[in-house]
Amino acid sequence: MSRVYDDEQLAGAYERGNEMPEASLQAWVELIAAYAQRSSPSIVEIGSGTGVFSAAMARWIEGSEVMAVDASEAMLSEARRHHPHPAVQYLSAEAEAEAVPAAGSVFDLALMSRVIHHIPDRARAARERAMLRTCGSGSRGGCAKGVPSR
Ligand SMILES: C[S@@+](CC[C@H](N)C(=O)[O-])C[C@H]1O[C@@H](n2cnc3c(N)ncnc32)[C@H](O)[C@@H]1O
């Protein structure tokens, strides 16, 4: 896995540096929510970082439940501190994109934002198709390479 984010200082800097105007964040969530085919969707965010999108989805997508998966404990720690939400479950860092611990779970929506380029063995990840594997039929997955703030 990519260890580049497994650093407390970097995780703190990432959290501070990625602050987004509320209106921009809400616009992103509206875009993401448009892919959900059900109301009150169950969502998995893979590579959830400091939890900005996980918490925002829980906040603005009514009735949603979000499972947030990241390979870095430092990033998850920032997420728990700065973006807690009762409908978000931040998993431990043992959860990686290549092996999402979601046996038996089916999600309506999977989000991977600014993560794919950090996965060293993309061919394996593609074969594993973690996002698709965790989604049922009629579910949707989205992968964003970059997230402009305005
Ligand atoms: C640029 S940050 C994006 C965070 C968040 N998705 C966002 O858009 O703000 C990339 C994140 O991917 C995580 N990551 C890297 N490789 C991963 C892997 N193999 N499985 C899960 N997460 C991974 C890193 O720990 C980091 O938190």
Image (tube, rainbow, N blue to C red):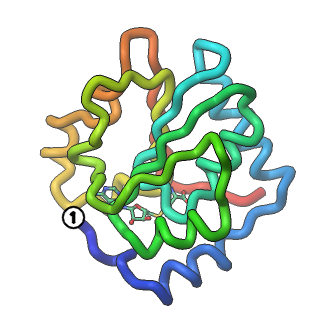
Q: How many marks?
A: 1
Task: Give me the residue at 69% from left, 33% from top.
Answer: 31
- Give the position of the C terminus as an image quadrant: bottom right
Q: Quadrant of ligand 1?
A: bottom left
Q: Amino acid at mark 1?
A: Met
Q: Is residue 45 left or right of residue 32?
A: left
Q: Is residue 25 left or right of residue 78?
A: right
Task: Give me the residue at 67% from left, 40% from top.
Answer: 58
Task: Give me the residue at 21% from left, 39% from top.
Answer: 126
> In terms of image quadrants, where is residue 123?
top left
Q: Does the numbered disc 1 mark a residue whose Cβ is under 8 Å from ligand 1?
A: yes
Kindly identify which residue carries mark 1.
1
Location of residue 37 in the rendering, given as x and y in whole percent from the top left corner: 58, 13
Foreground: 36 or 89?
89
Location of residue 102 in the rendering, given as x and y in whole percent from the top left corner: 31, 34
Foreground: 104 or 32?
104
- Give the position of the N terminus as an image quadrant: bottom left
Q: Is residue 115 left or right of residue 101?
A: right
Indicate the secondary structure of the residue bearing disc 1: loop
Mark 1, residues whose alpha carbon is within 10 Å: few (<14), some, or many (≥20)?
few
Task: Give me the residue at 67% from left, 24% from top.
Answer: 34
